[in-house]
Amino acid sequence: DVKVTQSSRYLVKRTGEKVFLECVQDMDHENMFWYRQDPGLGLRLIYFSYDVKMKEKGDIPEGYSVSREKKERFSLILESASTNQTSMYLCASTPSRHNEQFFGPGTRLTVL
Amino acid sequence: AQSVAQPEDQVNVAEGNPLTVKCTYSVSGNPYLFWYVQYPNRGLQFLLKYITGDNLVKGSYGFEAEFNKSQTSFHLKKPSALVSDSALYFCAVRVADAGNMLTFGGGTRLMVKP
């Protein structure tokens, strides 16, 4: 089975802190994604990557950056956390665009 | 631009009755369509997808969905609901041969009562 893991299930940070969210997949997938999930808004794509060191902006990249130094790992970085970044963050991976995406369990981030 | 609409925030159904969760989409081109389910405090789990071929797609846990091109819909259905089907359901769309970006609907909460 495909496994996508995220470094934390729950995280509490203070405004202005730098936050790292880590995602690791074990199936050698080319493509990885970061979404945030908010009630009534569904999932919105922040960034995605289709190869090592490659990244593309999604629908809401402002306030975020990403890093993909190794194929299995995709990191989401909040350079200076703000309260409006309080959300559930979901990581996903897929081998190709014809396939479904496999999701991690999510990280619920609270910024105080 | 592509978009997905799930017109119902919540669907209530009695156990044993059929259920339908609605999804309509808007894309320029041929769509790839997906349904995912999310149980409390969990990530999303894949249920089924339409890529091409038969308009009726069967998926996990007895769910199925019908692709209707003329109505631009992809409604999720199950003949007999279980209490354990209670969860949050998301429809998603991607344009064929146009990259990897999925667009998700806002989600529909399904409540199945005993």
Image: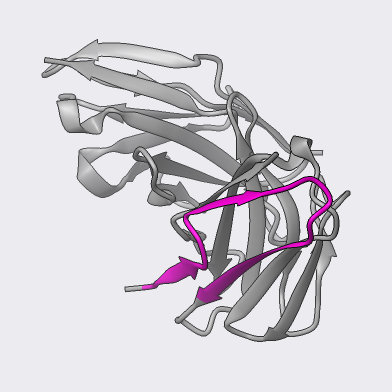
Residue range (magenta): A2-24
Q: Point out the image quarter for the N terminus of chain B.
A: top right
Query: Is residue A1 in sight in this rendering?
Result: yes
- Which of the two residues, A17 or B26, is positioned nearer the viewer here? A17
Left or right of residue A38: residue A105: left
Residue at the image point whose x is 47% and y is 60% from the top: A104
**How is the structure coloured here?**
one colour
Identify whether B46 is placed above or below A26: above
Count the labels in the image. 0
Identify whether B111 is placed above or below B42: above
Q: Position of residue A4 (x, y in %)?
A: 46, 69
Query: Is residue A30 in sight in this rendering?
Result: no
Residue at the image point whose x is 84% and y is 51% from the top: A16
Q: Point out the image quarter for the C terminus of chain B.
A: top left
Identify whether B105 is placed above or below B54: above
Q: Position of residue A24 (x, y in %)?
A: 53, 75
Identify whether B88 is placed above or below A80: above
Q: Is residue A21 magenta?
A: yes
Residue at the image point whose x is 41% and y is 31% from the top: B88
Q: Quadrant of residue A60?
A: top right
Q: Quadrant of residue B98?
A: bottom right
